Image (cartoon, rainbow, N blue to C red):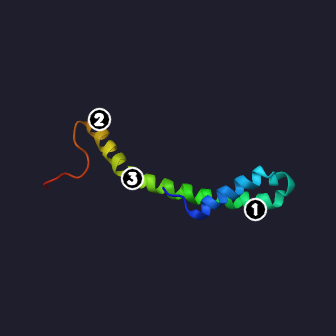
Amino acid sequence: MEVSQYLADLRLEEAAAKSANMHVSKPGQYKFIKESLDVEEAKYNEVGLTKRTMLFLPHIALQQSHSATIMTGEPQGPRKGV
């Protein structure tokens, strides 16, 4: 999943602030940058998780159906031709 330009910029800004020891010299300003980055990272991770989940749902359903068939000996799910 592609990272937004805003998130990429925040990552760079936080890295630059940390390398400049802003977390020590100006903790309030650094905290603002870090909290902004954390919020955007959380949004990015949530969207990524949602997309990955949607990709895997068909595979999970198929696995569950296959497991049920093995346990009961009969195919599970909607019957075709009925």
- Asked which quadrant contains residue 35, the reply is bottom right
| Residue at image mark 2 | 71
The kind of secondary structure element at disc 2 is helix
67 sits to left or right of 26:
left
Instruction: Residue 5 in the image: state x and y as whole percent.
Output: 58, 63
Q: Residue furthest left?
A: 81
21 sits to left or right of 74:
right
Instruction: Residue 30 in the image: state x and y as whole percent.
Output: 78, 58
Q: Which mark is residue 21?
A: none
Residues at marks 2 and 1, CA–CA distance in whole angstroms: 55 Å
Q: Residues within 10 Å of mark 1 (few under 14, many from 20)?
A: few
Q: Is residue 38 visible?
A: no
Instruction: Residue 34 in the image: state x and y as whole percent.
Output: 72, 57
Residues at marks 2 and 3, CA–CA distance in whole angstroms: 26 Å
**Which amino acid, by three-letter code, is at mark 1?**
Phe
- Asked which quadrant contains residue 66, the reply is top left
| Residue at image mark 1 | 32
The kind of secondary structure element at disc 3 is helix
| Residue at image mark 3 | 55
**Which amino acid, by three-letter code, is at mark 3?**
Leu
Q: Residues within 10 Å of mark 3 (few under 14, many from 20)?
A: few
State the residue at coordinates (80%, 61%).
29
State the residue at coordinates (86%, 54%).
25
